[in-house]
Image: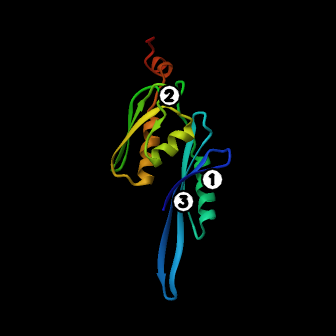
Amino acid sequence: MSTAEVKGDSGERVVQIRRCACVVKGGRRFSFAALVVTGDGNGRVGYGYGKAIEVPLAVDKATKQSNRTQMSVPIVGTTIPHQVLGEFRASRVLLLPAKPGTGIIAGDCVRSVVEAVGITDILTKAYGSTNPLNLVKATLDALKKLRTREQIERLRGVSL
C-alpha cells in the first residue's frame, strides 16, 4: 500500500505503509512499518522509518526519527544548483535543474522528498530498483552532494 499524503503545516509526508504478518499458533499477528519524509519547505529535509503494532504509532515513530535526521540542502531560486546523481544500493536517482514553470517531474517517492525540501522546478529520473525506501535514501544522497557556487569558491580558494 503506497500513499503520498500531506499532514499539517510541518511538511510531513507518508511515503509508504507496509503491513507485515507474523504467523502464530492462533493465526496471524500484524505489524506495520511507515516511511515518512519531513521538511520545512525551505531547504531542510529528513526521513524516518518506524515500525509498530498500529499504523498511527508507526507514523509517529517515523516522524520523530525524520525530525532528528534533517539536513540542509542548497536551493537556487526554485531549483537545484547543478545536475547530480544519488545512489543507494540498487537505486540511482538523477536530479536535473529546470527552468521556472517546469514543475516537479518525478515519481511518488522522489516527489515527496523534493516537495518537502521546497524545490518547485526539477527534472528527475530513477534507475535500477524502485523500492521506496531505497529511492528516498538515493534522493537524499543526491541532495547531500549539492554545492552552491559560493561553497565551491570557498572550498577551492578561487573566484569563479
Residue type for callout 1:
Lys
In which quadrant of the rendered image does the C terminus lie? top left
Q: Is residue 40 visible?
A: yes
Q: How crowded is mark 3: few (under 14 residues within 10 Å), some or many (20 or more)?
A: many
State the CA–CA distance, disc 2 to disc 1: 34 Å
Q: Which residue shows up at 53% across the image and 74% down it?
A: 30
Q: Are marks 3 and 1 in contact (CB under 8 Å)?
A: no
Residue of label 1 = 64
* Among numbered discs 3 and 1, the one appearing first in the sequence: 3
Q: In this view, does 142 lie to the left or right of 57?
A: left
What is the C-alpha distance between the residues marked 2 and 3? 32 Å
Circles 2 and 1: CB atoms closer than 8 Å = no
- Single out the residue that lies furthest toward the bottom: 25
Residue closest to the eye, 35 or 102 = 102
Residue at image x 44%, y 28%? 98
Res 101 label: 2
Name the mark nearer the viewer: 2 or 1: 2
Relative vertical location of residue 75 with respect to residue 39 in this rendering, above or below: above
Disc 3 or disc 1, which is closer to the eye?
Answer: 3
Q: Mark 3 points at which residue?
A: 34
Crowding at dot 1, Cα within 10 Å, few <14 / some 14-19 / many 20+, comes out as some
Q: Distance between the residues labelled 3 and 1?
A: 12 Å
* Nearest to N terminus: mark 2 or mark 1: 1
Residue placed at 62% from the left, 44% from the top? 11
Query: With respect to residue 71, does 62 lie above or below?
Result: below
Q: In terms of secondary structure, where does tag 1 sit?
A: helix
